[in-house]
Amino acid sequence: MKLSSTIPDYAHFLTEVKGRIQTARLQAGRAVNRELVMLYWDIGRGIVERQKTLGWGDAVVERFAADLRAEFPDMTSFSADNVWRMRQFYTEHSTPEFLEQAVQELQGQTGMAFLGQAVPETGGNTENSILGQAVPEILAQAVRELVSRVPWGHHVQLMKKLKDPAARLYYLRATAQCGWSRSVMLNQIKGKAYERAVKEKKTHNFGVALPEHFAEQANEMLKSRYNLEFLGIARPMKERELEDRLIARLQAFILELGYGFCFVGRQYRLELEKKEYFVDLLFYHRFLKSLVAFDLKIGEFEPEHAGKMDFYLNLLNEKERGPDDRPSIGIILCAEKDDVEVEFALKTKTNPIGVAEYQLQENLPAEFKGKLPTAKQLADVAREFLPPPKAPAKPKR
């Protein structure tokens, strides 16, 4: 018999303390990371300011790095290259272009968060907004707070790979909010998450089905297409199999959906009198405060899909929506879509519905695009060079 089994409440107390220790270690690690990143920020700022006001040349950076290494030989972060990165770190996050983008983000944040925290609504009146009162102080603090929540190794990769201030800000926010590891962040950059979430055209009716501020937030939540390469699918499948794969890799799917999604259930049952209906996947979005229903389609979008989703949303709003929840949102996830067809299909729908494509395999490399024949071209060639099919023989009498 183990000694722990004879001591009342010992196992429970041990488990509780283990959890506290793990939490404390994680919080300590985050605190150390925050202090290091702020140290590097201040070093970079100090160098930049003295170069401007005192005429320091570039050679002083090499000397400064050497003196720091001599004083702190056990710290490996004071190589000349890394000190140059500290200067770059401060400079690139203090440029007018980056600060202008940060101002736009702050002005646009009403319910969604710039730093994972809600920003008060301004009612569209900039003069009365928090930005109108003290732009420099708020902006400087907001940028410092954001960069301090992202590990230094992430910053190094972002500086190497991204020059567009808007893209940099997007990945900084996402990393801070979602706690992305460096490999996850790099995969998101490779998968063009910023382009799919912000720059590419999205098809939905949020603008007419929702109030203005909520419509903007819902648009930010939706992506033009979703990268499902993590499913490892390279063959035709049924919709239920696609759903099974997504549930099996639910963590990866939520990561692809974006910050704020909480899983509610699959084949979520809805009743109407004696009939029952099932939503493929149901989520709740913490910041939108809205149920989000997904309908999975293995083929191309069809207009009747919008009618079915509109019906599901009516049921969700009537039977599942909480007292303080906003209207439920539907997302039809399909293999292909025609934007004009989607636009006409959503014209008369009163519920907010978005239509997005999903990608199961990596796109064709850019150097091959336009150089390989399409399926139609191959079919045309086949018809030209292959003999026509023989007519079926007439049955003998």
Image (cartoon, grey):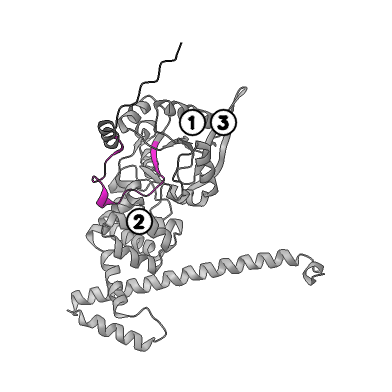
Tag nearer the camera, 2 or 1 = 2
Residue at the spot of label 2: 189
Toward the viewer: 64 or 161?
Answer: 161
Q: Is residue 26 magenta?
A: no
Of callouts 2 and 1, which one flags the residue occurring earlier in the amino acid sequence?
2
Amino acid at pointer 1: Leu
Numbered badge on residue 319: 3
Q: Position of residue 380 (x, y in %)?
A: 26, 33
Q: Position of residue 80 (x, y in %)?
A: 29, 80
Amino acid at pointer 2: Ile
Residue drawn at point x = 38 percent, y = 40 percent: 357
Can you say whether 18 is above or below 383 in the image?
Answer: below
Q: Is residue 233 visible?
A: yes
Q: Label 2's element?
A: helix
Q: Position of residue 388 (x, y in %)?
A: 30, 27
Numbered badge on residue 313: 1
Q: Which residues are magenta?
A: 355-376
Numbered badge on residue 226: none
Of callouts 3 and 1, which one flags the residue occurring earlier in the amino acid sequence?
1
